Image (spheres, grey):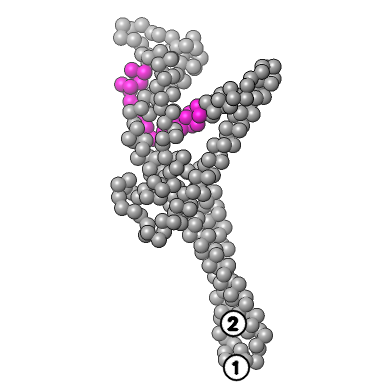
Amino acid sequence: MRWGTTIVDQHRSSPDGPPAVRVDDTDQLQAAARELEALVLYEQARHLAEVHAMLAERYRRDGVQVQDAELDAQADSLALLERGDRFLKDVATRLHPGSELLALARQVDDHGLGVWREAAGSLVDDCPPSLVHLRWRVEEEQRAELRTHAHLVRAEAQLDGEHRRLGPVGRWWQHDRVVGLRGELADYRRRRERSGRRLAHLDAKLQVIDRSEHARAAWIVQAREVLIRGLAAAQILTERQQPNAVEPAAADGSVRLGAGS
């Protein structure tokens, strides 16, 4: 997965528009993109480890011996299928199969529908990543940092005011106090500047998340044909799995029972 540069270059409102930030902001946006990418890769690795552990425990419980390479391959395949299913659930909030496609899908057997769904789900790694679930975390960090930054700004202003109120004579008579004030001012200034840099980094993260979501939406529109078939297949397969499912009347007036009947 290498999406940092493309996401950074993505304009917020138009996928073909000019860069949305100044050139000197690009490094910061790329750093934010790399950090978010690392987090997404970590989440995927953790999910793969959970699937691997689940399969290993199942085989152990059933007393089945399986080679490590085979177990790894099965875990990879299952983790990809689960990611594909989550991907299709997200796509289902953006695309909706029409009645004609659903009618066509009802004429396809379960194997064919499975092929449709698997083809759509396999596009999960081609699609720009979904980072929306990370937004709340970044926004929480941003709110906390804004409170810290506001406190530092007030404290720095208070110390600076106290220093100026001393005047030349006061600074001469209270040399030790002046030295202390200057030291405190320098410390608060460093902390305030560091907090400002942290806020800029968090804002860059939010920009990357926004651009990733925009790029994802644009990509889904471009891949609509394959995705919409996968969504139709998933819907019809779900209908057939429902107990006592009854399919719509056929052209000759007969009624076909679902698989659950």
Q: Residue at x 56, y 79 (%)?
A: 160
Q: Residue at x 38, y 29 (%)?
A: 227
Location of residue 5 with respect to 80 vertically, above or below = below
- Magenta stretch: give its range: 80-105
Do labels 1 and 2 touch, CB within 8 Å?
no
Residue 221: tell me if it is visible. Answer: yes
Callout 1: helix, strand or loop?
helix
First along the sequence among labels 1 and 2: 2
Rendering quarter of residue 147: bottom right
Residue 205: tell me if it is visible. Answer: no
Residue 59 included in the magenta stretch of the image: no
Type of amino acid at the residue the image marks with label 1: Val
Location of residue 157 with respect to 17 vertically, above or below = below
Q: Position of residue 44 (x, y in %)?
A: 54, 37
Q: Position of residue 127 (x, y in %)?
A: 41, 36
Callout 2: helix, strand or loop?
helix
Rendering quarter of residue 222: top left
Residue sitting nearer the eye, 160 or 250: 160
Q: Residue at x 49, y 17 (%)?
A: 242
Q: Is residue 45 left or right of residue 65?
A: left
Marks 1/2: CA distance? 14 Å
Label 2 Cα crowd, 10 Å radius (few <14 / some 14-19 / many 20+): few
Q: Position of residue 57 (x, y in %)?
A: 67, 24
**Residue named by callout 1:** 169
Residue 97 included in the magenta stretch of the image: yes
**Residue named by callout 2:** 162
Type of amino acid at the residue the image marks with label 2: Glu
Name the main secondary structure of what is drawn in magenta.
Answer: helix
Q: Residue at x 37, y 32 (%)?
A: 95
Location of residue 148 with respect to 106 vertically, above or below = below
Mark sitting on residue 193:
none
